[in-house]
Structures are given as C-alpha cells and as structure tokens.
Image (cartoon, helix red, strand yellow):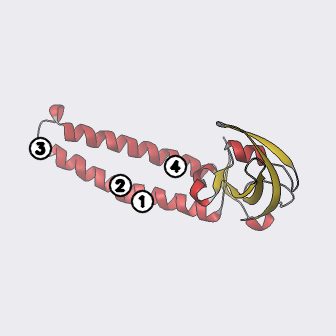
Amino acid sequence: MAINYMTKEGYDALVKEIEQLEKVERRRISGQIAEAKEKGDLSENAEYDAAKEAQGMLEMKIAKLKNILGDSRILDETKVDLSKVGILTKVTVLNKKTNSSVNYTIVSEKEADLKLGKISVKSPIAMGLMGKKIGDHVEVMVPAGTINFEILDISVV
C-alpha cells in the first residue's frame, strides 16, 4: 500500500468526484441500460452492450478512486519542512541552460496540473529535486535529456 499525501483541497476534490460518479453518472448509465433493454432482444443490441461496457468502466474508475482515497493522507501545510524540497513545497529553480527561473509546486499524482505549475511527486523533475536545499545544483534526467537546475527558493504552497 502506497500512501498518497494530498492537500485538503485535493482530498475534498477527490471525494466530490467520487460522489459525482456514484450519484450522477451511475444513474445516467442505468437509464441507458434500461432504455436499451426496452428495445428488445439483448443478444443483438449494440446500445445495451455499449451501456454495459460503460457501466463496467465507471465501476472500475470508482473503485480506483476509492482506493486512492483510502490510501490518502491530508498533509498539514503548517508543518511542511522548508529546509528542503518535499511534497507541498513550492520550489523556484533556475534552468542553467536557458537561464530562466521556473516555479514548481510538488503535489500528489492526483493533484498534478502542469499548466498550474503543479508537478507530481513521482515525476522525474520532482524526484530529482526532492530532499535538495536552496543553493543546491541538481541534474534531472527527463525523457528529453538532462536538465541542470539550481534551487533558488523553497516556500510553502
């Protein structure tokens, strides 16, 4: 069992997503199945087969999200160690090749959103930065090659 550390907002969003799937999507798919059943012979009813497949996929997704939720722990942002890069820290790095600075917030996989600068704790960049301190120089292996960073700042989310 791998523990997923999340913000309170991320945890609440996951709970809300599960509720949406269980209360709204389940009802919608059940309606599709009932409608397809009314059309007669189920052995050659493509709509029925598609609705049953959608139902199976939905139930798999709900089960997966519930597993993630069950293994999740809410992190207290007031207790984040700012002496080094860790989950729920915002880190400012200087890309040595481009001489530009970038901000990354290290979050759980479920909360990652690159457009918002939130990267998964399991991403190559986050894994390369974890445990490092301000002033450290870090080589991070990414699919496109190696990126050299200098850590400029670490702050709380």
Q: Nearer the viewer, residue 138 or 49?
A: 138
User: What is the quadrant of the C terminus in the image?
Assistant: bottom right
CA–CA distance between discs 3 and 4? Answer: 33 Å
**Horizontal and vertical percent position of residue 37:** 17, 44
**For mark 4, what is the residue?**
65
Q: Earlier in the sequence, mark 3 or mark 2?
A: 2
Q: Circles 2 and 1: CB distance less than 8 Å?
A: yes
**For mark 2, what is the residue?**
25
**For mark 1, what is the residue?**
20
CA–CA distance between discs 2 and 1? Answer: 7 Å
Q: Earlier in the sequence, mark 3 or mark 4?
A: 3
**For mark 3, what is the residue?**
39
What residue type is disc 3 on? Lys
What residue type is disc 2 on? Glu
Q: Quadrant of residue 57?
A: top left
**Residue found at x 23% / y 46%:** 33
Residue 51 in the image: above or below residue 118: above
**Residue found at x 38% / y 59%:** 23
CA–CA distance between discs 3 and 2? Answer: 22 Å
Q: Circles 1 and 4: CB distance less than 8 Å?
A: no
